[in-house]
Amino acid sequence: MAYRVIDGVRPRCKISILSCSWGPTIRVPMDGTDRLGQHEGGTKIMDDTTSANPAGPAASQATPGAEQTPYRVLARKYRPKDFTDLIGQEPMVRTLTNAFSTGRIAQAWMLTGVRGVGKTTTARILARALNYKTAEIDQPSIDLTTPGEHCPAIMEGRHVDVIEMDAASHTGIDDIREIIEQVRYRPVSARYKVYIIDEVHMLSTQAFNGLLKTLEEPPAHVKFIFATTEIRKVPITVLSRCQRFDLRRIETGALASHFSSVAAQEGIGIDDESLSMIARAAEGSVRDGLSLLDQAIAHGGGQVDAQAVRAMLGLADRSRVVELFGNLMAGDVAAALTGFRDQYDSGAGPSVILTDLADFTHLVTRLKFVPEAADDPSLTETERERGADYAGKLSTAILSRVWQMLLKGISETEGSSRPAAAAEMALIRIAHAASLPSPEEALKAFQNGGGSSGAGVAQTTAGGSHGGSAGSSSGGDAMARAVGERHMPQTGNGQPSMRLAHSAEPSVAPPAAEPVEQVAVASLEDMVVLAEKHRDIAMKVQIRTGVRLVRIEQTRLEISLAPDASPSLPGELVKKLKDWTGANWSVALSREEGAPTITEREAAKRDALVSDARQDPDVAAILSKFPGSKITDVRIAATEEELAGAALSPSEDGDILPAETEPDDNSD
C-alpha cells in the first residue's frame, strides 16, 4: 500500500509506516483542521484506499440504511458556544468586553472555580474571540453571534493554533520546554497561537519556573489561558503575570431555570420540585447538574418526577425533613425516630437525612435575620412557611446548639460502621437538648431562685410525648425541677409546643434573697483571712501563690497572674469574693506586672533573714566548724509582751490558749 501527496507539496507532519504481514500502514496524526488528515499547511494526505473510496473503509462495510447519529450527553450537547450562553459569569464577560473594545488584551488569563463551572469552555470561547474572523470582521471580538472561520475547529478542540494541554498528565519541565520552543513560531492560520493549560496547579515547581520568563514577555502572537480548581497551589509569581477571573458557583434558581430550558428542548416533562432537587445536588456546577438531569431522564424512561429523582439521588423528602425538625424541637423522640426510619426505609441515607436537617436549621436561622431569604425559588412552599414560623419561635441559642450537634452527628454517622444507629443517637441527643436550657440560662435561673430559665428554651410537658418519648422528657423534667418547674404552653390538641422567644414571666415571684453582711477587703492578706475563715484551703493557696496585686479599689480588683497560676483564677475569685463579702466584685487581668505574690514576698523576706544570719560572727563560726552545713530557716524569738498577749488571746472556740514558754538556750 502506497501513499501520495496531493498538490505536489510534501507534508510537514510526521508519518510512521508500520510493517506487518499484509503490508505497510500509514499513520497520520490528527493535528490539522480536517478529520481526514489535513496537516497544518492545508495539504491532505491520502492512501490508495482513501482516494478510491473517499468515504473510507467504514462506508464500504456499512449496512444499507440511514446512519444512526451517536448520542451526545447533555453536558456536551448544550455546552456554551459564546459568552451569551455563559450562566452567572456577568462580571467576567463585562471585563472582557471592555478589554476587547479598548484593545487592552492581556497576554495571559487565569480562570479559577469549582468543577463543572465552565473553565475549559470559557477558555475555548476566549480563544475563539481572540481568533475571530469573518468576511466582514477581522479582529478580536466578544460578539460571536456569527460563526467565524476558525470557530468550529476551536470549539471542537482540533484547531492547529489552539493547543490544549492537561497539566495533570504533563507536569514536568520537559513539557513546558516544548511550549517554550514552539512559541517562537507564528500561528499557521489564526491570528494568535493560544495555549490552554488545564489544571495548571498540577505543574511541578521546575515547570512553573521554566514558564515564568515566557509568560512575562511572550511573543505578540501568543496568548496563554490557564484553568485551575486549586488557585492556592499556583505560585504567586505566576498569578502576578495573569489576569485572574473567579468563575462563580451558579445560583440554584439560575440552574433550575437552565435545566428547565434544556428539558423543554429535549421534549422531556419535568416538574419544579425535580428541577430544584437536581439544582441543589449540582452545588453550583452546570456540568454536574446536566449529568444528573441526563441520569434522571434515563432513570424515568423519558419522564422525570420528584419521586424518581429522590430515589435516584438517595435524598430525603423535604416535607418530612421539616416534620422531623418539628418533632425534635418538641422533644418527641418517638415521632422523630419513626420519621427517620420511614425516610431511611425509603432509600435516604442516614447522613443525608442529618445533612438535610442541618440545611433546614441553617434556613430557619437565616430567616430569623434575613426574612427575604424566603423568596429563594429553590425552596418548597412547606420550607418557606414552616421555616418562617420556626424562625419566629426559636431563639438563636437553640438553633446554634442544634446546628453544632447536627454537624457532630453527621461526622459520627459518616465514620460509623452502623450509620443508622449513629444517626438515631444523634437525633435523641438533639431532642433532649432542645428541651433543656443553656448553661447560662440555667445559671441565671439558679441565681434568681428557680425563676425563668431564659428566652427561647424548648421544654416538653410531662407525658407530652408519645410512647417511647417518656425517656426523652425525663432529662427536660429533671432540669425543669432544678430551675423551677415551668412547662411549655399547650397547643389546641394537647401536644406540647415550642416556647416563644419571649416567654411570660412566672406567676410566682422568687423569694427575696437574704441580705449578706458586706466585708471590706483591702489587700491579698484580707482575702487569705477570708479563705481561712470559710475553710477554703484551695483558694487560699491559689491567692498566696498565683495572685500579683496591681491595684484594689472598693469592689474592683486588678491583678496579674503568676506563671503557674490557673487561667480560671480570676473567674473563681469573682464568685468567691461575692460569697465572702456579699458584694459584686469585678476582677480584671492587667498587663502590668503587679506586686509579688504573698509566697514570693515571704521567700524574699526569708532569704534576707538567712543572708543577715550568715553575717553574724557566731553563726559564721558554727558554719565553718561544720563544712557542708547551711541555714534553712530563721525564726525570731517573741518578746515578753508578745508572749503575754498570746497567753491571754482566745482561740476560735473561745478558749484561752496557754502561754508558750521560751525555749532554753540548751534545748535542741
Image (cartoon, rainbow, N blue to C red):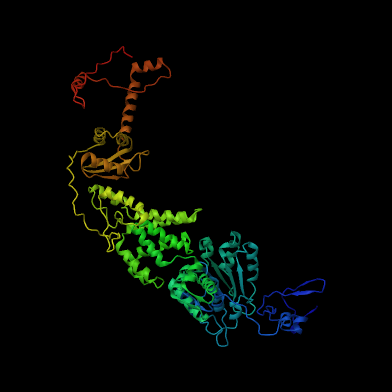
Please identify the quarter of the rendering in which residue 211 is found: bottom right
Residue farthest along the right direction in this orientation: 21
Residue farthest along the top direction in this orientation: 666
Q: Nearer the viewer, residue 566 or 628?
A: 566
Residue farthest along the bottom direction in this orientation: 136
The reply to whether residue 399 is in sight is: no
Residue 338 horizontal side relative to residue 123, left or right: left
Please identify the quarter of the rendering in which residue 364 is found: bottom left
Q: Nearer the viewer, residue 505 or 623?
A: 505
The reply to whether residue 550 is in sight is: yes
Q: Nearer the viewer, residue 576 or 6?
A: 576
Q: Residue at x 29, y 58 (%)?
A: 456
Residue 134 image point, x, y percent: 57, 85
Residue 602 image point, x, y percent: 31, 30
Q: Residue at x 46, y 61 (%)?
A: 344
Q: Residue at x 18, y 52 (%)?
A: 508
Note whether 6 is above or below 245 in the view shown.
Answer: below
Residue 490 image point, x, y percent: 27, 60
Note whether 362 is above or below 428 in the view shown.
Answer: below
Quarter of the image with the N terminus in it = bottom right
